[in-house]
Image (spheres, helix red, strand yellow):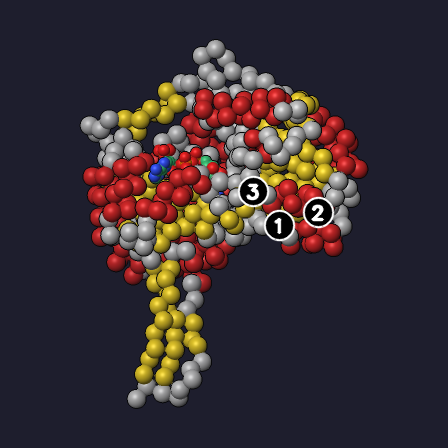
């Protein structure tokens, strides 16, 4: 753990971090709780006054240094990521670049946190809006993007003048620890960035009960997000939530089928299907259904499965046995209710380790199947035939989630008409990979509150302070 500029960890019980590709133990991190969390919060609180008092230009210098260090250590960060959570190494390199881009972009965006001067209704009064850093921020992150989900919070928080206490996922804490090392190298003053590992419920309790924490930013499941909403009520803590998804992909008759197949493969199988914006349900209009299924299955058959550290691997292991079981159950349920497996549909687990599943396409699915109702978080693509654009929109919106959706059509008016009716915070139109540092990322409905990235991403870490100035 990294608390007040010091490394802490001796004498704690530990959590094993294992490689999901082979079950090997690759590290141990402290299993800490409330005491260390409160120490980290105190450190962040003590550092806040000085850090928020720096100019945005001074804070940007630290962030730019961190960006440079991340790029210099890209390979090392990528290897750690692949070892701790199984992501294919070429994707891990991409994630490090993506993660670093948030630090670089927000270093600059911090210089554009403008206030406002509002025309007054009286000659002897001036009306202004000033911007203030929120204060100490607690950031809780998931395992599936162990670096990017952290920097997407840390970048804007630090740029705005906040100090942070980070709690990474116990499944993949090593990337976060490496990032702390780089923060130390970049020379951030002590207490500005802190990291604790351990019991999520105890750490969350300390965060919720400590009045010094003014803001919580969380990425993870909707289930845990709802717990945090309830727990944060007592102190009315500010909350940003990036939660689960169940993304529909709509492929209409006039789509470029090859582009749709490429988009579907990119969106569905990235990170072994374990991203919040993975296409989870594919609705294809009847005129091109057979052609799409045939070409999609052919492309999916080409994907190589294996240990992500191998350069040629496209699809790695699931994060753990529970993840593997969920995927397997979704496929079995669909088949038992009448779906047909076009390719895959089988586990590739070895006797002693159960994390691999074949990249899978199933067709003739229907709304009664679990795979069409819940986030699968695995390499399974269910394809459902639809007759009309209206039917596709109705199916797409029939979920409590509202994170990402995809639409494939070459007809501009049709694309606009369909997208306007979709209740999703992010839409890829003829595009399977919409994420970038400079755009607002986030969900409608039960997929979250707020946006990360883009200029909205920094708004989450500043408060407006309205100042009325008398001129007598
Ligand atoms: P998760 O189980 O909700 O865990 C996320 C984080 O919360 C982890 O650090 C976890 O710690 C911690 N946590 C667990 N229980 C907690 C509690 N009671 N109080 C406070 N913290 C708690 O999610 P995950 O399995 O790591 O990640 C996958 C989920 O994240 C999926 O639903 C995915 O869609 C979503 N996600 C969303 C976005 C987005 O931008 N919207 C991006 C990526 C992922 P431990 O690991 O130590 O238990």
Q: Quadrant of the N terminus?
A: top left
- Residue 433 vertical position relative to residue 174 in the rendered view, above or below: below
**CA–CA distance between discs 1 and 3?**
11 Å
Residue annotated with mark 3: 399
Residue annotated with mark 2: 390
What's the residue at 32%, 55% (across, down)? Answer: 236
* Image quadrant in which you'd find residue 52: bottom left
Q: Nearer the viewer, residue 204 or 69?
A: 204
Residue 325 visible here: yes
Residue lying furthest top: 351
Mark 1 neighbour class, 10 Å CA radius: few under 14, some 14 to 19, many 20 or more: many
Disc assigned to residue 422: 1
**CA–CA distance between discs 3 and 2?**
16 Å
Residue 138 visible here: no
Q: Is residue 377 left or right of residue 1?
A: right
The x, y position of residue 161, in whole percent, is 34, 57
* Image quadrant in which you'd find residue 407: top right
Determine the secondary structure under disc 2: helix
Q: Nearer the viewer, residue 101 or 228?
A: 228
Q: Are marks 2 and 1 in contact (CB under 8 Å)?
A: no
């Amino acid at each position: 753990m990294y608390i007040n500029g010091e490394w802490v960890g001796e004498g704690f019980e530990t959590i094993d971090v294992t490689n999901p590709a082979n079950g090997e133990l690759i590290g141990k991190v402290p299993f800490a709780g409330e005491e260390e969390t409160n120490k980290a919060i105190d450190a962040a609180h003590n550092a806040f006054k000085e850090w928020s008092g720096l100019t945005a230009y001074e804070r940007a210098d630290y962030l730019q240094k961190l960006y440079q260090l991340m790029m210099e250590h890209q390979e090392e960060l990528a290897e750690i990521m692949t070892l701790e959570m199984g992501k294919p190494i070429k994707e891990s390199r991409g994630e490090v670049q993506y993660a670093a881009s948030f630090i670089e972009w927000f270093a600059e965006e911090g210089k554009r946190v403008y206030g406002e001067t509002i025309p007054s209704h009286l000659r002897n009064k001036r009306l202004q809006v000033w911007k203030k850093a929120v204060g100490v921020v607690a950031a809780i992150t998931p395992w599936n993007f162990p670096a990017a989900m952290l920097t997407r919070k840390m970048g804007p928080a630090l740029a705005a003048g906040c100090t942070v206490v980070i709690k990474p996922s116990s499944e993949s804490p090593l990337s976060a620890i490496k990032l702390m090392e780089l923060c130390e190298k970049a020379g951030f003053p002590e207490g500005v960035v802190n990291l604790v590992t351990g019991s999520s419920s105890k750490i969350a309790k300390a965060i919720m009960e400590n009045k010094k924490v003014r803001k919580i930013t969380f990425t993870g499941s909707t289930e845990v997000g709802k717990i945090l909403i309830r727990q944060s009520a007592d102190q009315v803590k500010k909350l940003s939530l990036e939660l689960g998804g169940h993304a529909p992909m709509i492929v209409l008759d006039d789509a470029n089928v090859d582009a749709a197949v490429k988009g579907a493969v990119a969106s569905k199988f990235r990170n072994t299907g374990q991203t919040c914006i993975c296409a989870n349900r594919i609705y294809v209009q009847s005129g091109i259904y057979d052609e799409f299924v045939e070409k999609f299955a052919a492309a999916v058959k080409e994907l190589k499965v294996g240990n992500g550290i191998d350069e040629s691997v496209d699809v790695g292991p699931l994060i753990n046995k529970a993840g593997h079981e969920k995927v397997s159950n979704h496929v079995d349920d669909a088949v038992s209710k009448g779906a047909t497996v076009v390719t895959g549909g089988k586990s590739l687990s070895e006797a002693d380790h159960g994390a691999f599943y074949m990249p899978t396409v199933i067709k003739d699915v229907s709304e009664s199947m679990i795979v069409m109702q819940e986030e699968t978080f695995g390499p399974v693509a269910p394809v459902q035939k639809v007759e009309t654009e209206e039917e596709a929109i109705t199916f797409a919106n029939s979920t409590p989630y509202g994170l990402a959706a995809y639409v494939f059509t070459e007809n501009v008016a049709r694309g606009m008409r369909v997208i306007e009716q979709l209740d999703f915070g992010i839409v890829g139109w003829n595009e399977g990979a919409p994420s970038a540092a400079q755009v607002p990322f986030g969900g409608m409905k039960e997929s979250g509150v707020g946006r990360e990235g883009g200029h909205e991403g920094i708004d989450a870490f500043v408060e407006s302070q309205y100042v009325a100035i008398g001129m007598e």
